[in-house]
Image (cartoon, rainbow, N blue to C red):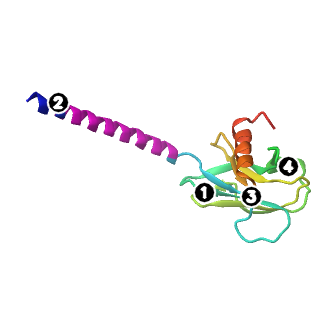
Amino acid sequence: MTRIDDWQKLATLIAAAIAAIGAALNLWWQYQAKADKIKVGFDTMTPHIAPGYSLHVVSRADHAMVITDFGFFDAAGRLLSLPYLWQDEPDDDPISIDGSSELAARNASMEVRGITLRDSQIGAFAITSAQQHRTLGFRYDVSWWRRWWLRLKIRWIPGIQ
């Protein structure tokens, strides 16, 4: 009889452990579903022939969010924030903006086209009001090691600019 009791206790313990792991995963998934998720691209979403740099931001979350900062970065990882640039230089060339910085639902997008800059840019960034780190998008020809280094430098070492 004791052998059956031991097996029952072991089965109960295993079932309780599986239930605890499932509950922890469910909590993690619920937490992640509320996080702001965006995709940033260093190009246009639609074919466009205008000269200059372009970027687009697409919502990947099911809730509304606000893009607070967006712009470009160069090969050294120096950031160029477009809202701050436009605040300092309001009379520059006209810039084409499609969409709004308020992304209402999944697949809502914002696109900025025709930015003419003096320095060469290799990527774009954006950040929402609830994010702590910038989301990066790279030009297609940037090597994997440069992408890795710039992600490390821009996202995790903000003091090194």
Distance of label 1 from label 4 (alpha carbons): 25 Å
Q: Position of residue 47 (x, y in %)?
A: 74, 71
* Residue on which the image places disc 3: 42
Left or right of 39 in this view: 10: left
Residue 31 in the magenta stretch? The answer is yes
Q: Earlier in the sequence, mark 2 or mark 3?
A: 2
Q: Nearer the viewer, residue 35 or 20?
A: 20
What's the residue type where badge 4 is placed? Leu
Q: At numbered mark 4, what does the secondary structure look like: helix, strand or loop?
A: helix
* Residue on which the image places disc 1: 104
**Mark closer to the observer (3, 1):** 3
* Residue on which the image places disc 4: 85
* Residue on which the image places disc 2: 6
Distance of label 1 from label 2 (alpha carbons): 56 Å
Q: Mark 2 and mark 1 in contact (Cβ < 8 Å)? A: no
Q: Nearer the viewer, residue 78 or 62?
A: 78
Q: Residues within 10 Å of mark 1 (few under 14, many from 20)?
A: some
**Mark closer to the observer (1, 4):** 4
